[in-house]
Image (cartoon, helix red, strand yellow):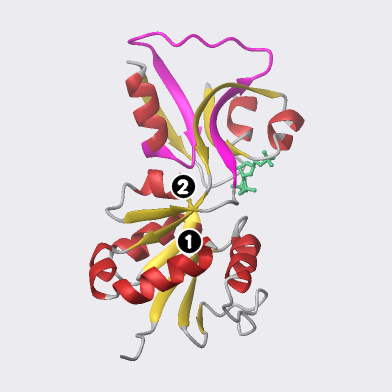
Amino acid sequence: MARKRITLALAKGRIFNDTLTLLEKSGISIKKIDKKSRELIFKLDELTILSCKPSDVPKYVELGAADCGIVGSDCIAESQCDIYEPLSLNFGHCKMIVAIKKNQKFEFKAGKEVKIATKYPNIASEYFKKKKMIPEIIYLNGSVELAPLIGLSDVIVDITETGETIRKNNLKIIDTIMNIAAKFIVNKRSYRTLSNEIQSLSDSIKK
Ligand code: PRP
């Protein structure tokens, strides 16, 4: 029986190059993907690729706009989407941390309010609620490290990879919330209806 074409949503940004390298190593010809192009859909021989904002990848997969995707586990956790996560990949390693100004102290005290600047409101709220604190989220789209420096927030919840941004901005990490890596995710319906195609893709990227 002929293989059906599947759609794979990829996260642009920090893990995009590693994702393309993985696909290439898996025997998928990625020649048609022009990294500099503004195109968002690439039709490869076996796959259709969607080039997405990382935080949107789980949503595309949950809604079935893509059968599967490759994205960081930070975006998966934040999205709270109902998807399968059959495979962890060996790239995109970083961690989700809580940080404050270097010269400040912070007490995890039940009942205390805490202003959190973050791109990850769900993860941040859940973390501080578990500490029995009262989170006030200041949602930012980027350069989150700026917030405590100018008095906009008490803490940040953000990802760190090299630690360079934290160091350069005189911040310090006070806790790690989770370790992060890229994952292969799958739409629940496609997992059943396109099981051979998805298994085959999963096997080739696992090798
Ligand atoms: C991420 C993250 C930190 C930085 C950490 O931002 O939000 O700001 O990388 O990386 P490091 O530990 O290697 O310094 P990103 O580069 O995605 O840009 P943004 O600040 O615009 O979100």
Could you tell me which residue is drawn at 39 percent across and 67 percent down? 68
Q: Quadrant of the C terminus?
A: bottom right
x and y, in percent, of residue 163 in the image: 70, 34
Residue on which the image places disc 1: 70
Please tell me which residue lies in front, 140 or 56. Answer: 56
In this view, the residue farthest toward the bottom is 2
Report whether the residue tagged 1 is closer than 8 Å to ligand 1.
no
Please tell me which residue lies in front, 175 or 148. Answer: 175
x and y, in percent, of residue 18 in the image: 64, 61
Could you tell me which residue is drawn at 52 percent across and 21 percent down? 154
Q: Which residues are magenta?
A: 93-122
Disc 2 residue type? Ser
Disc 1 residue type? Ile
Query: From what the image shows, is residue 43 above or below residue 161?
Result: below
Query: Position of 48 compared to 63: left or right?
Result: right
Tell me the tag on residue 73. 2
Query: Tag 2, which secondary structure?
Result: helix
Does residue 139 show up? yes
Query: Position of 62 compared to 152: left or right?
Result: left
Query: From what the image shows, is residue 162 above or below residue 196?
Result: above
- Residue at mark 2 to residue at mark 1: CA–CA distance: 9 Å
Query: Position of 66 compared to 46: left or right?
Result: left
Query: From what the image shows, is residue 75 above or below residue 157?
Result: below
Query: Position of 74 compared to 80: left or right?
Result: right
Could you tell me which residue is drawn at 61 percent across and 68 percent down? 20
Q: Is residue 25 magenta?
A: no
Query: From what the image shows, is residue 72 above or below residue 150?
Result: below
Q: Are marks 2 and 1 in contact (CB under 8 Å)?
A: no
Does residue 153 show up? no
Could you tell me which residue is drawn at 30 percent across and 90 percent down? 1
